[in-house]
Every structure is written in structure tokens, then in C-alpha cells.
Amino acid sequence: MKLKQFIQQETVLTAAAVLAVVSAFFVPPDVQYLGYIDLRTLAILFSLMTVMAGLRRQGFFDGLGRALLSRTHSTFQLTLVLVGLCFFGSMFITNDVSLLTFVPFTFVVLSRLGADVRRSLLIPVVCMQTIAANLGSMLTPIGNPQNLYLYGKSSMSIGGFVLLMLPYTLVSLLLLLAWAALVCRKNSAALSVDELVSSSASQGDQKIILLYLVLFAVCLLSVIRVLPYGIAFAAVLVCVLFADPHTLRAVDYSLLLTFVAFFIFIGNLGRIPAFSGWLQEFLTGREVLVAVLASQVTSNVPAALLLSGFTAETQALIIGTNLGGLGTLIASMASLISYRQIARELPQGKKQYFGLFTLSNLIFLAILLGV
């Protein structure tokens, strides 16, 4: 029973582990396995996840959201703030953390409004928050795990990375603004700040928050290759162990293990000449489209890990896996965070959410692929 529950909760990790084990029958373990593991990606990913988990536990992002809401006076402004928090926040705190933080925050905020307004806004806003988090995370190497990995494999500067994804990000922002105006056209209403912002919000430890902000700066220096990743990893681990050890329990270790399993699987596939040659030939000239399609069934992180082993066109993979986060519910695993929140808080709205989510994603994906 526990095994079944684990597989249901960690489907991607389980699949990655099975693929790694199966591939080991074709390429028996040897010393070359050690070269499969990208320690830089794992160390930086752990560091960033730890820092984000610490800031989230201290209520830093919740406080930021409340500060922005204090300047909100209409449903249109409210929608822009809630969606904008996910869009811009994901650029720096990852799409997962944005949704883990701001979707529950949205349920709290909208619960203070009238029943009619809440009912008309909740599902559309959460749906678009999810899309916004996936789209905003495209812009930076730290926006999502596949960007961090592909940026590390490339020889791009951080400026080059941002310029590559900037056109798609700007178009995404315009689409989100148009969507917000459409949703709020029939539900426009004035709001009281007191309705939205509770004065009883708890304050985190300011010294701990400052520590995490400093550690975040250290992580950024390692991402842009100014500081060795080992120093950033050690700094985060030591500081958190002494200052806030409970945060280490909140780190998504299953994601790290998923990376390790895929590294083994991809490394072994690369040593099977027949498969390696076929995949390289199939990918050539089709990197963006294949990455988008692969993301629909495996999600974009595994797609990035898999395809990166068989093509040198890293920039095309960056575009393809980022756009590939749109589409199906599993195209980006971050999307499941919002779906689970809806299923728990509004179970009767699951079908409506799924339908709106799928339709909206396909529209956005079609437009961005056209770009």
C-alpha cells in the first residue's frame, strides 16, 4: 500500500528510476557512470530550493503579496496582481515555488470577497496563475529546473539567455494582460483594501530572511559562474544547518533524485550506438518541435534531460522545453500544484478547471509557437 502511494505521489521519479535500472542491463555499471552526474546542476538546484523553502517558511513572499494588494482597488487590479505575482515571481523563485506560495494565497484573498465575485474569479485566476508561472519562468536560468540544467550545459551568458527568451516572455505578458481584461470585463467591481489585506498576518524572523536573501545572492553568483558552485552549496548548507535546520525538510529531494536517475538513463542511452544515432538524426532540425511534443507526455524537465544528450542545439531545446510547459496538465509538473489545490479546495470545480486550463494552454502554445 505504501509502495502504491509512493508511486502515485512520485510518478516521474519512479519512471526515471525504472528507466535507469532497465538501461543498466544494456550498459552494466562501470566507472563511466560517475561521469554521467552533473554535480553543478544538482548543487545549485539544491541551494536554490533550500533558500526558496526558507523564504517561503518565513512568509516573505506572502508579505510581498499583501504589500501589493494594499494598493488594489478593483477586480481588474486584483487579477493583475495575483497573476503578476506568479509571472514575475517565477523568474526568480521558480514556477513551483510561485504556485506553492501564491495559489493558496489566492484562495485566502478571494475568500474575503462576495460569493458571486469569488465564484466567477477563482477558477479563471488560478488557471491563469499556473500559465503565468510557467511563462514567466522562461526568462531566466533560475526560473525552472530545465533552464538551470540547459543553461549550465550551454556556453551562453546570462544576458544571452534572457535575450533568447525575451520575445516569448513579452508576448506572453501581452496575452496575459488581454486575458485579464477579458475575464474582468463582466466582473468589474470596486474593492476595499480592508477586504483583501488582513492586519493579523504573521511576520517572519527578519534576521533569517536577511540571511536567506544573502544566500540567494550567493546562489546567483554561482549560476552566472562568478562563484564556484561548491562554495555556494557549502555556504547554503552550513548556514541553514545552524540558523534554520527545519527548512532542510522542505527541500524537494525527489526532484534531485529524478535528475540523478535521468542522468544515468541518458548516459547509458548515449553508449548504445544504434539508439543514439537514430535519435540524433531524428532530432536534427526539429529540436523545438520534438521538445514541445516530448514535454506533453513526459513533462519538460525529463524532456530537457533526455534530448540534451543527443543534440548540441541547446538554445532550441531551451525554447522548446519552455514552450512545451504549455499544453497538457503534465507538460509542466508545476501545473499539478494548482490542480491539486483546486481539487482539494473546490472539488466540484475540477472538470471546469481542467477544461479551461487545457483550452487556455493550447491557445497560448499555438500563439507562442507562431512567434
Image: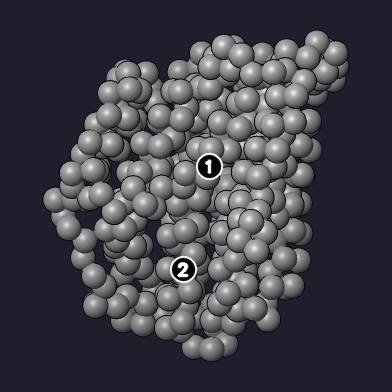
First reached walking from the N terminus: tag 2 or tag 1: 2
- In this view, which residue lies farthest toward the left? 207
Where residue 325 sits, quadrant-wise, is top right
Q: Would you say residue 84 is visible in this rendering?
A: no
Quadrant placement of the C terminus: top right
Q: Residue at x 33, y 48 (%)?
A: 248
Query: Residue 310, percent across and down?
Result: 72, 17
Q: Amino acid at mark 2?
A: Pro
Is 333 situated left or right of 102 in this image? right
**Mark 2 crowdedness (10 Å alpha carbons): few <14, some 14-19, many ≥20:** some
Q: Residue at x 68, y 81 (%)?
A: 348
Q: Would you say residue 33 is visible in this rendering?
A: yes
Q: How many marks?
A: 2
The residue indicated by pointer 2 is: 104
Q: How is the image coloured?
A: one colour
Q: Amino acid at mark 1?
A: Leu
Quadrant placement of the N terminus: bottom right
Is 334 situated left or right of 324 in this image? left
Q: Residue at x 63, y 31 (%)?
A: 262
Give me the C-alpha separation between circle 2 and circle 1: 22 Å
> Could you say which disc has been placed on residue 255 in the image?
1
Q: Secondary structure at mark 1?
A: helix
